[in-house]
Image (spheres, rainbow, N blue to C red):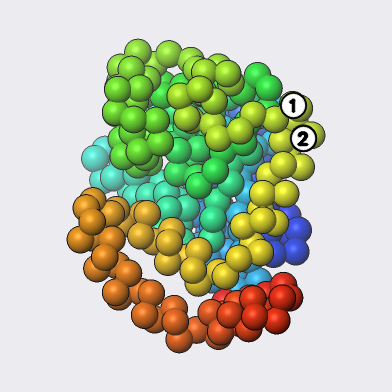
Amino acid sequence: MSELVLLQRHGAVAEVTLNNPRTRNALSRDVLHALADILESLEEDTQCRVIILTGANGHFCSGGDISGMTAERPLPIGRSRMLLGHRVVRAMLRGSKPVIAAVEGYAAGAGLSLVAAADYVIAAPGARFVSSFAKVGLVPDLGLLWTLPQRIGIAQARRMFYSARVVDDQEALKIGIVDSLADSVESMHREALDLAEAFKANAPLSVALTRMAMARGINCLEDALAYEVDNQSALYLTQDHREAVDAFVNKRPAEFKGL
């Protein structure tokens, strides 16, 4: 496993840490490869129920690796890089495991894209968020054109995109980039683990199909009703559903197996 991205297990919770201190955890090609490989492997891991994504060395992620942009990149190379990043976003958004982002320091550019792709965001005091693409002559990438408006609304997203302004922790909480603000870095990690425990306590197939619906998009009532017909009827047949019913009737905790 690459030391650029670390993986630590807490039972059914996988903590994935960006670890490239020289660049404040910038998403170089090597980091993207390592991150995509780990996220995809966790999707296949039946022992993993929840993923926490964080950054080491005082920062979440400073975005793309600017030092790697000095050489001219022909169109095929640029496309290849974007497709590599899309592996990461698809693993986060279309995978079956909820993703919690624990943010310390800066989440800039593509780092903000990782934040916006998470299901829940916890920030430490002093966290900063910026869509810095306009500063380097690029458009928001790694899905941010879709995920950020979904999270904070079109008007706020436009303001962040066009101005490339830095949003501090308090404003991030107010406008919805962040779901909760911890008292310290230590409590941020503790709260992320507590939330992950709450997520993993529920039926994994139910959570997975709900995430897939959110990623695909429910645009109207008929979309929701059609999704229910296709998927709720299948969930009725699962062992986990029967286990939940039996646990409710017998007043005991359910033990879900993802079956």
Residue 216 in which image quadrant: bottom left
Direction right: furthest residue: 186
Spot occupied by residue 168 in the image (x, y as percentages of width and height): 55, 17
Residue 231 in which image quadrant: bottom left
Spot occupied by residue 199 in the image (x, y as percentages of width and height): 62, 57
Residue at point 55% right, 35% down? 179
243 or 151, which lies in front? 243
Question: In the shown orientation, is residue 259 left or right of residue 89?
Answer: right
Residue at point 57% right, 70% down? 203
Spot occupied by residue 91 in the image (x, y as percentages of width and height): 45, 57
- Is residue 7 in view from this perspective? no
> Which quarter of the rendering shows the N terminus?
bottom right
Q: Residues within 10 Å of mark 2 (few under 14, many from 20)?
A: some
- Is residue 102 in view from this perspective? yes
Circle 1: residue type: Asp
- In the rendered view, tell whether residue 78 sits above or below residue 163: below
Q: Which residue is mark 2?
A: 187
> What's the mark number on residue 183?
1
In what element is the residue under mark 1?
loop
> What's the mark number on residue 90?
none
- In the rendered view, tell whether residue 199 sits above or below residue 249: above
> Which quarter of the rendering shows the C terminus?
bottom right
55 or 124, which lies in front? 124
State the separation of the CA atoms marked 1 and 2.
6 Å
Does the residue at mark 1 contact the one at mark 2 (Cβ under 8 Å)?
yes
Question: In the shown orientation, is residue 130 left or right of residue 106?
Answer: left
Circle 2: residue type: Ser
164 or 2, which lies in front? 164
In what element is the residue under mark 2?
helix
Q: Residues within 10 Å of mark 1 (few under 14, many from 20)?
A: few
Question: In the shown orientation, is residue 207 left or right of residue 139?
Answer: right
